Amino acid sequence: MKIAISSSENNENSKVSDRFARSEYFIIYDHDKLSFEAIVNTAKDEGSGAGGKAVKILGDAGVDIALVPELGPKALEALLAFDIKSYQYPREKTVKEVLYLYFEKKLPELLISTSKGKH
Amino acid sequence: MNIAILSGKGGTGKTTLSVNLFSYLNKGTLIDTDVEEPNSHLFLKGKLIKEEGVYKKYPLVDDDLCNYCGKCGDFCNFNAIIPAKKKVLVFQDLCHDCGGCSLVCPTDAIKYIDKEVGKIYHHQIDDNKLFLYGNMTVGEVSGVKIIETLEETTKNEEILLIDSPPGTSCSTVAAIKGADYCIICAEPTPFGISDMRMVVELLRAEKRNFGVVVNKYNLGNSEIFKYLEEEGIELLEKIKFDREFANLLADGELLINHSEYFTNKMANIAKKVLGDKND
């Protein structure tokens, strides 16, 4: 199982990002190998449709779960299409801290988008 | 001859100038290309003679034919089509209707279907004038297609006035596409001048001839006149701010029906821009 977290920097001790699809990095935690990997979020500079593209990056990386600060309607639709579940983390935490919160089942699952799409 | 009236900043008097100049002319056609919030029609009393839909195409994917190769998603610059695991997502409002995804699809799984993005209303004004305006459907992102349709419909008019959208984005570029001459309607405020500079830059890049009407010239400061002189830009006319004008406009009245001062201004602009074409 792979878990992706939107991150402001490239390691598991970084602060989580305030934006999902326009974060600098995604930290991918591989629960089978107990390893972390950072991937650069190439969707963040898209003029439009960053949400869909970011989800595609996660889908292609084989992610099963995304921990996110917020989600627009397009990103949520794309996550559902890629069978990726999403959970909302509180701000100002580190990547590791929100992962612990996830495993303690303290993060709410997102079933509706938390923000309107931005153009 | 096609004349676009534009401003950069909103609220400088584009529509006031457009509808009054149009009403002053003996003949001609006016199109309101500010399709996100058209308002020329509030001043022009005419007869609605035609109403038509404007359509944009967007892709529809046949899941039975799709092999999930991902080429459509790789091609799209706007992330409007995202191939997921068992279905291909299409975000209609992101699509720019370029047709690229269906071209690169190896299994012909992508068709294009129509979606109404707005309407165009044709009005007969007096016996010999036409007025058209576009209105974008609420929720749509871009009015460019509607503006292009307005311009295509009226490309052979003898005299065409184009009331343009504010700003210098895609909509404005589309509105001035067919213009032979542009009138910048500017106001002498810091914001007005700053936005006018962007319009000047746009018109120079697009190689358009243009002149400036300074509206409400007795407000703000004299910076704008200095700028026009320094840049060698023609000052077509300056029009004063008058509270009575504001009252009349708020009542939906044409200023040329009430003010000799304003009528003279329109006459002078028409003469400078159209020469003897209005005779």
Image (spheres, rainbow, N blue to C red):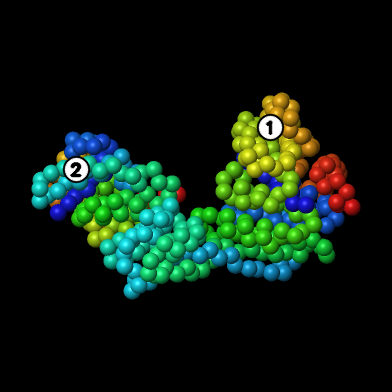
For the residues labelled 2 and 1, say whether their Cβ atoms are less than 8 Å apart: no
Q: Residue at x 38, y 66 (%)?
A: B106
- Which residue is identified by label 1? B188
Q: Is residue B172 above or below residue B197?
A: below
Say what secondary structure mark 2 lies in.
strand
Query: Badge 2 sits on which subunit?
Result: A
Q: Nearer the viewer, residue B145 or B103?
A: B103
Pointer 2: what residue? A37
Image quadrant where residue B269 sits? top right
**Residue farthest toward the bottom in the current orientation of the protein:** B64
Q: Find numbered disc 1 in the image and state the secondary structure of the residue it sits on.
A: loop
Residue at the spot 53% in from the left edge and 54% down from the top edge = B142
Quarter holding residue B6 = top right
In the rendered structure, the answer to whether residue B274 lies left or right of residue B189 reads right
Residue drawn 71% across and 60% down?
Answer: B154
Question: Residue at 83% of width from left, 53% of height from top?
Answer: B25
Residue A89 shows up from this direction: no
- At which x and y percent is residue B163? 69, 50
The answer to whether A105 is drawn above or below residue A97 in the figure is below
Q: Position of residue B29 (x, y in %)?
A: 76, 58
In the displayed structure image, the side of residue B259 where residue B137 appears, left or right: left
The chain identifier of the residue carrying mark 1 reads B
Q: Nearer the viewer, residue B228 or B192?
A: B228
Give B94 or B141, whichever is nearer the viewer.
B94
- Disc 1 marks a residue whose amino acid type is Pro
Picture coordinates of residue B226, whole percent (x, y): 71, 25
